[in-house]
């Protein structure tokens, strides 16, 4: 979710700023002489530089076609106005990290040949219920401009935390007959009715991935709406769809999709139905979400019917490297996946309530796993089993079954230290626990120096090192000191300003920082804002930072994608002063009680600030005040 060009910002990238695309003269106008004189060859001096510029433009356009990295393309656009124009003319993939950072019309005016769009909406804290319903991030204002500008070019749309309606999906399908790829991550507002229209009209659809999105049940059989005959589908993921599906239609669709490589099933698909799908496409699948991994309630019991040999059908899945699902798992069926464990590079048990004893026979064969997600039900013993086997592990996420602050944690510093000792190549970790020690965090900083992402979530508020009783300052300080590649950090536990002094002094590459219930004074936030030059996203909640801390970052906010502060000690007057000092910044006070009777010294419940080329948005709800 991202140097000092104070009045410019990137329209499509986390990393670099873009020059303004308004009111400039071209290199040709600057370089060519307005006076022509004859020559013996009969070719004017005006013609020669013009022809040369055209040749150079063609060469540049061909060179830019080879640049695929957004960062490289943004750097090229900053060379001069001619490169800026040509880069926009040749860009086919567009990334916009905040849908309110730029208007759709400005995007389509600058970039004219876009085939792929990634668009993000609400900030990450919306995932935790901290953003009131109806805040915004609607896709609808984008659909019509996209249809006007990019018909029929646009083929791919990836949306994250956006509100998407059924009408939006229908407009996409009708506007782009060659549409191939739709990915909706953490989106809402649409249902099975919209999906049915979309899949019926997109006859060249290759990818439909619905990930952690809320899909309303309109009692429409959307799976059966895919066109008859051979399908172009390469990826179909709908594990977040909570309503039952027509399995016969799904089986027919899978059978008609010879290019299918990724399949993610929801909890209404039983292990028996999974068996039938794997018989059809198992050998070619690289990515599989298993569905429930349990018997259907309608399935026969006892000796009425012999169960299939599930292990044999998994044995045929020679291409499988990513395995997830297990949404209503019966652990007795876990031996069925043993045959594929050796080839797996990613194993996701984040919905599987299994213990260490049930995990061990699976994980002992997963020597190539680089990504592992699980619930804390596997306990420290399960993490020790992972550490003993998965020497190639790059990413670990451990989620809580019980996310209450006073819940009983099943993992601790014992499991964390085991992972740090057994998995030296670890680059990313998200670890939920109820207690932790500085010693374990320091050990991880030394054993895993390649860490890029470190997110430790001690769920209880203000919890110190449970052995020494000291704040967790030294542990997080060691992370930023010893992990030189660190770009993302989430802190928790009892932290004083000393921890933020460490972050500001050593976290020179940190781009995303999240913390809650932390710090003593305004100095803590000042250390971060003055010491982390690469900071792009800053998320703060329930911390004692006030207006003085907020004002210490005035030099930084134009370079950041956003700042979120909720339940801190900000006032409307302090926030308004930031808005006046930085007019290109949109400053939103969310949850203001009564705008008419609002006083300047009233506290701000939630502050959301983000850079924008278009200024104030036009869909502000009543509970939001733009300062």
Image: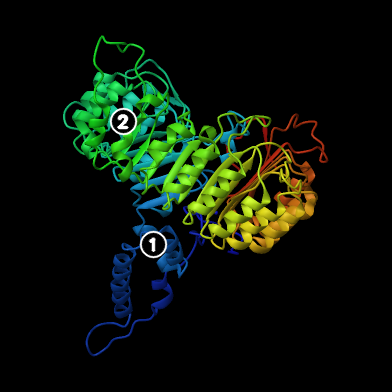
Q: Which residue is mark 1?
A: 87
Kindly report the distance in space between the C-alpha atoms of the residues bearing marks 2 and 1.
51 Å
Residue found at x 33% / y 21% = 270
Q: State which tag comes first along the sequence, 2 or 1.
A: 1
Please give left or right for residue 355 compared with residue 317 in the image: right
Relative to 167, residue 528 above or below:
below
SS class of the residue under badge 2? helix
**In this view, 213 is above or below 64:** above
Query: How many numbered circles does the render carry?
Result: 2
**SS label for mark 1:** helix
Seen as rendered, the residue at the extreme bottom is: 40
Q: Is residue 468 visible?
A: yes
Q: Which mark is residue 336?
A: 2
**Residue plotted at (57% across, 49% down):** 417
Residue situated furthest left in the rendering = 229
Residue 158 place in picture, x, y as percent: 40, 41
**Residue drawn at (49%, 52%) of the image:** 422
428 in relation to 52, above or below: above
């Amino acid at each position: 979710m991202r140097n000092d060009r104070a009045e410019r910002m990137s329209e499509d990238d986390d990393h670099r700023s873009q020059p303004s695309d308004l009111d400039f003269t071209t290199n040709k106008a600057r370089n060519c002489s307005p006076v022509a004189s004859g020559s013996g060859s009969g070719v004017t001096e005006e013609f020669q530089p013009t022809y040369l510029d055209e040749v150079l433009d063609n060469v540049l356009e061909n060179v830019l076609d080879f640049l695929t990295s957004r960062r490289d393309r943004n750097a090229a656009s900053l060379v001069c106005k001619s490169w800026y124009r040509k880069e926009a003319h040749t860009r086919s993939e567009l990334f916009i990290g905040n849908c309110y950072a730029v208007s759709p019309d400005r995007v389509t005016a600058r970039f004219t040949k876009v085939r792929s769009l990634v668009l993000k909406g609400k900030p990450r804290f919306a995932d935790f219920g901290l953003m009131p319903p109806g805040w915004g991030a609607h896709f609808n204002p984008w659909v019509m401009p996209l249809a006007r500008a990019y018909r029929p070019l646009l083929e791919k749309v990836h949306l994250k935390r956006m509100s998407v309606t059924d009408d939006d999906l229908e407009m996409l399908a009708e506007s782009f007959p060659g549409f191939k790829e739709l990915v909706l991550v953490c989106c809402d507002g649409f249902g099975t009715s919209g999906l049915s229209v979309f899949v019926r009209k997109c006859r060249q659809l290759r990818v439909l991935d619905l990930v952690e999105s809320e899909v309303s049940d309109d009692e429409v059989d959307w799976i059966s709406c895919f066109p008859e005959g051979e399908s172009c589908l390469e990826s179909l993921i709908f594990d977040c769809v909570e309503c039952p599906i027509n399995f016969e239609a799904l089986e027919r669709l899978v059978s008609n999709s010879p290019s299918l490589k990724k399949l993610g099933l929801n909890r209404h698909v039983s292990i028996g139905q999974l068996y039938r799908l794997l018989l059809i496409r198992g050998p070619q699948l690289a990515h599989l979400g298993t569905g429930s991994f349990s018997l259907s309630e309608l399935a026969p019991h006892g000796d009425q019917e012999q169960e299939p040999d599930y292990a044999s059908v998994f044995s045929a899945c020679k291409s499988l490297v990513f395995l997830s699902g297990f949404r209503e798992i019966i652990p007795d069926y876990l031996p069925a996946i043993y045959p594929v464990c050796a080839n797996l590079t990613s194993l996701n048990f984040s919905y599987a309530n299994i213990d260490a004893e049930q995990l061990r026979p699976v994980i002992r064969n997963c020597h190539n796993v680089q990504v592992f997600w699980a619930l804390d039900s596997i306990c420290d013993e399960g993490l020790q089993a992972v550490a003993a086997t998965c020497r190639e592990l790059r990413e670990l996420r451990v989620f809580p079954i019980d996310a209450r602050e006073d819940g009983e944690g099943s993992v601790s510093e014992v499991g964390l230290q085991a992972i740090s000792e057994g998995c030296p190549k670890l680059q990313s970790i998200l670890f939920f626990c109820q207690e932790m020690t500085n010693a374990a965090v320091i050990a991880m900083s030394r054993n895993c120096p390649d860490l890029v992402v470190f997110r430790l979530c001690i769920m209880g508020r203000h919890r110190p090192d449970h052995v020494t009783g000291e704040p967790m300052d030294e542990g997080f300080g060691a992370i930023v000191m010893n992990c030189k590649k660190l770009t993302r950090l989430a802190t928790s536990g009892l932290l004083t300003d000393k921890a933020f002094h460490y972050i500001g002094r050593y976290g020179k590459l940190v781009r995303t920082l999240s913390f809650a219930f932390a710090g003593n004074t305004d100095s803590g936030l000042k250390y971060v804002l003055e010491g982390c030059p690469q900071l792009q996203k800053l998320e703060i909640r329930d911390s004692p930072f006030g207006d003085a801390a907020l004002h210490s970052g005035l030099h930084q906010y134009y370079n950041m994608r956003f700042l979120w502060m909720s339940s801190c000690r900000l006032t409307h007057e302090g926030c308004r002063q930031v808005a006046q000092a930085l007019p290109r910044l949109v400053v939103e006070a969310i949850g203001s009680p009564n705008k008419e009777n609002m006083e300047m010294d009233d506290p701000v419940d939630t502050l959301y600030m983000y850079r924008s080329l278009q200024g104030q948005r036009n869909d502000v709800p009543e509970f939001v005040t733009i300062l």
